[in-house]
Structure formats: structure tokens, C-alpha cells
Image: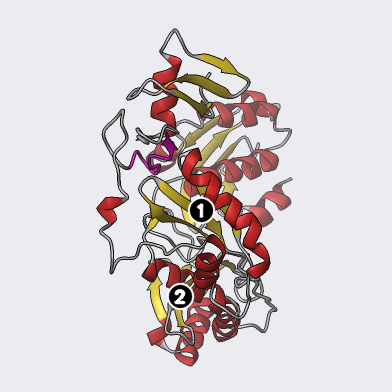
Amino acid sequence: MSCLLMRESPLIIALNKEKTLYDGFITVLEKDFRIRISLPPDHQMKRAKLHCCWQMKRLLHGYQHIVKQRLQHSTTLMAFILELRTVLEVALKSQPGCQSFSPPQYYSQLITEMEILGWDKLLFIDAEFRTLQLKAEDSAGRQHAITVKLKSKYPAEAPEFSADLPIPLVITWTSQSTLANVHSQFLLNVEALSDFWSVLDEIDEKTWVLEPEKPTKADSTRRIAIGNNVSIKVQIDPRHPKMLPECCLLGAEHVVTPLRNKLNANMHLWNPDCTVLQNMKDVLEIEFPSPTTHEKSSFSVECGICYSYRLESAIPDQVCNDPRCGQPFHQVCLYEWLRGLPTSRQSFNIVFGECPYCSKPITVKMVTGNA
């Protein structure tokens, strides 16, 4: 055992001939800790005693029971030291601000690759030189960013990639790949989505978009105002952006029904050679309100219960079907209101009750998560 101990932990030596007292240093993650281990005459580890420096005591705070357990169950001193080294490594890595530095060639490789790619492409790099953000501009002048998380064995080990895209990012990696290769592949990904973003850019520019409030490049849906308390939610297919999108008309039934009938009757008029917005105008036989003709406040009607327009991320999308009322409500507000009335009733996931404003019949779907 002494030879094995010398080979695995050369800084720990026996202080007596009986080899019942050992002293020295244990090295973990390039840090040295002073230890002393006293063994009974029969060398049984269960009756051994461990003494250590104050730095190691502080590090093992919260791990004492694990160390005692390892001491009780280890068959040899060498086995215990290996167990102790594992516990110390876990404790060190769990410390706030613990950094494991890569070899010098990692940093020189990274700097060389950035010089080839161009430092102007670098948006961000963290203090550990592990996470980078690279920027790219597509043919339409849109700005994009890809996040690259490098591994300790870079470039032999593939990094992790992420970007604000509506479809999965596809980057192939080999041990010979570089950041320049990643940047080129990322540009191919965004160029393939150019038509998709052009469709959404036109919608964002020429209509009043109610949701999302601040769309990202990954958002493929838009809720577009048609009139007071009437809107259409469209979902554009990123791979076939000029085709007829999924549509959902929202609003009072007496207003939505004629629009839905037109949509169903005129679907055959959809022309892939025209823009999506123009096709929607032709199919629905309407003109969408635009920033040049209407104020957005015309469509931002407050909820009739909480008197706010935006409740977290939701806007009032439940509307009284009575043409003389047409008051909008947040789904959660209307659901809680109706649930508190003794005259309301529930069938499956639909609650039936009276409009808080005009007392006419109104329904709302049960809010997910509520009883």
C-alpha cells in the first residue's frame, strides 16, 4: 500500500516505522491542503482520525458527515484519500466564483480564430472566455446574433450554439471547424429565413400588432387589429412564409362570423405571388387599420373588470357578444368574476354566466391551473 500511496499522493508520507501516522499535502484542482491521519495499531480505518488545515476545514463545512462516512467505510488509507479528494473537488467546484482555467493553447487558439473572423463580429465575451456572442447581418440589413458556449476541450469538443430563430439552428462541427465556419453557417441559416422576416416586417410596419408587444425574431405569430375589439391571429410558417397562414379570428361572435365566412369562401383566391398582407386583405375583403390612419389607443380598450389593458402578457380578448355592449375582458378576470357569481354554471371547461356590464349571456373557457 505504501508504494501505491507514494505514487498517487507523493506529498503524503509516513512519520513512523509502524506507519500509523501520516502527514503531508493533498492536491485538488491545483490547490494544496495540509492533512494528518492517525491510524490505530491494527490500521483499521474506522478508528482513524483526520486532522486538517483551517482552509480545508472551512471548505468541508457541510460535508463533515460525508467525510466521516467515507472514513468508516474505506478499507485502506489509499481508498480513503481518493474518496477525500473527490469530496474536496465537489466542494471546490460548488464554491461561488470557482474558475477552472483552460490551458494556454485554448486562449491562443481562440484569439487566432477571432483575428481571422474579425473582432468587429464579436458582440460579447465573458470573463472566462467561455461564452461568446457573434453578430451577423443578412442581405436585407437585419442584425442577428449567435451565442457560442465553448467547452474545455475546444475545438475537439463541439460548442453549444443558440440563436433567436423560429426553427432549430443547424450548425455542423468537426474538430477542424473554427468560429469563422460557425459564422458562415449561421449566415446561411438566417438567409434561408429572409422571406419569413420580410412577411413579418410588412405586417409590423403596416398594421397595428396587438401581440406580441415586443416580438423577437423567433416569434412567428402576430395578432393584428381589425377593428374595435376584433382581431386576427396569424401564424406564419417559417419554411413556407408566403403560403396561407394559420388564422384565428378573435372578438364578438356577431362581428367574427361574417369575417370567418369570408375567409372560408375566399381561401381559393390566395396568391403566393402576392404579399401575405395583401392576400389577407383580399381574402377577408377588408383594409387593416395602420399607423398612418389610426391611433393604437383605438384598439387598446381596457378590461371592463380590472380596468387595465395588459395584464402580465395578456390583453382583453373575451368580448361580450351583444352588439350594444361589446365590452372586452381578460380571460382570467372574466373567469374569476363568473366563478364568484351564484348564478353562473360550468359545463366541462366552459363557464356560463352574465356579462358584468349588460347582464347578457356570456361564456369563458376555464383558466388553466384554476379549479
Highlighted magenta segment, given as a residue range: 310-319
Q: Is residue 19 left or right of residue 371?
A: right
Q: Which residue is mark 2?
A: 144
Residue at 50 percent across and 28 percent down: it is: 364
Q: Is residue 197 above or below residue 355?
A: below
Q: Is residue 135 left or right of residue 41?
A: left
Q: Which residue is mark 1?
A: 233
Residue at 53 percent across and 52 percent down: it is: 259
Q: Say which amino acid is labelled 1.
A: Lys
* Quadrant of the drawing holding the N terminus: top right
Residue 10 makes an appearance in the image: no
Q: Say which amino acid is labelled 2.
A: His
Task: Evaluate if marks 1 and 2 touch, with contact meaning CB atoms under 8 Å apart.
Answer: no
Q: Nearer the viewer, residue 144 or 45?
A: 144
Q: Residue furthest top?
A: 342
Q: Is residue 248 above or below residue 185?
A: above
Question: Which structural element holds mark 1?
Answer: strand
Distance between the alpha carbons at the discs numbered 1 and 2 = 26 Å
Residue 225 makes an appearance in the image: yes
Residue at 70 percent across and 40 percent down: it is: 79
Q: Is residue 346 magenta?
A: no
Residue 225, position as x, y percentages in the image: 40, 55
Q: Is residue 371 left or right of residue 78?
A: left
Give the color scheme: rainbow, by chain, secondary structure or one colour: secondary structure
Question: Which structural element holds mark 2?
Answer: strand
